Amino acid sequence: MSNTINMKIQNSDFTFENSSVRILANRNLQEIKLPGSTIGPFKEGNEYDVEYWVACQLVKLGVARFGKKEVLDANRLYKIQWKERVQRIRQLSKLPDEFYPKLRRYLTGLQEELTQNQEKMQEYNKAKQVARDIIISRLKKIVSLASAPAQTQQILENLTREERFLYQKIYELVNQWQVEIIKKR
């Protein structure tokens, strides 16, 4: 099962890497032709939609920066944590689009900053703890939902792609267990 989970997360990351994100051009850049696609041209100050992997390269080169909604930061993470805590046990708040891939990249970015600046250790540890709190809170809710009778689509719509997979597996396991536990032998 761990291979299946790993594959689901890899598929989610692949989908995210190729999804469209909004960037803001920091400077002009001529059109770049790649096999099968063209990037740009970009005019300083304008916003553009590009694939995430392209955006990462443009950001590294200083040509562009991500739009506010495209990346997680500490403030957004704290707001998500607070929102999760105030929800009832069987109520899941809507997470930002592609939350888990963004979370992994945010934590990885903080970890990479540690190699250049050890003062970032506290920020990294705090972000990692907040991320764990969010994950544990949502996991408890998913297990609770999966242990109950089948949920309506309305309740499940706030699950991310990764959470929906987990919910389905837990739901199947719990139902199989319930059938077997009362089966006449």
Image (cartoon, grey):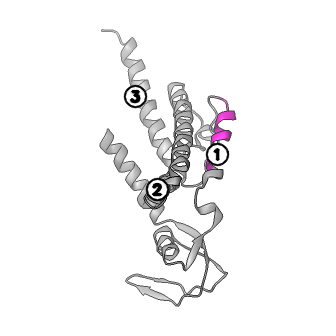
Q: Marks 3/1: CA distance? A: 33 Å
Q: Marks 1/2: CA distance? A: 21 Å
Q: Position of residue 152 (x, y in %)?
A: 60, 36
- Label 1 SS: helix
* Quarter occupied by the C terminus: top left
Q: Which amino acid does label 1 sit on?
A: Tyr
- Label 3 SS: helix
Nearest-to-viewer mark from 1 and 2:
2
Nearest-to-viewer mark from 3 and 2:
2
Outermost residue, top direction?
185
**What is the magenta range?**
77-88
Mark carried by residue 173: 3
Whether residue 100 sits left or right of residue 2 in the image: it is right
Q: Does the magenta stretch include residue 80?
A: yes
Q: Name the residue under label 2.
A: 114
Q: Nearer the viewer, residue 181 or 97?
A: 97
Q: Marks 3/2: CA distance? A: 41 Å
- Label 2 SS: helix
Q: Does the magenta stretch include residue 94?
A: no
Q: Where is residue 163 in the image (x, y as percent from the top left)?
A: 50, 42
Give the prevailing secondary structure in the magenta stretch: helix
Q: Where is residue 117 in the image (x, y as percent from the top left)?
A: 49, 59
Give the answer, above or below, for where 118 lies relative to 67: above
Q: Which amino acid does label 3 sit on?
A: Leu
Give the answer, above or below, for where 168 lies relative to 44: above
Contact, mark 3 vs mark 1 (Cβ under 8 Å): no
Mark carried by residue 78: 1
Q: Nearer the viewer, residue 173 or 109?
A: 109
* Quarter occupied by the N terminus: top left
Q: Position of residue 23 (x, y in %)?
A: 59, 72
Q: How many numbered marks, from 0 up?
A: 3
Q: Answer yes or no: is residue 94 visible.
A: no
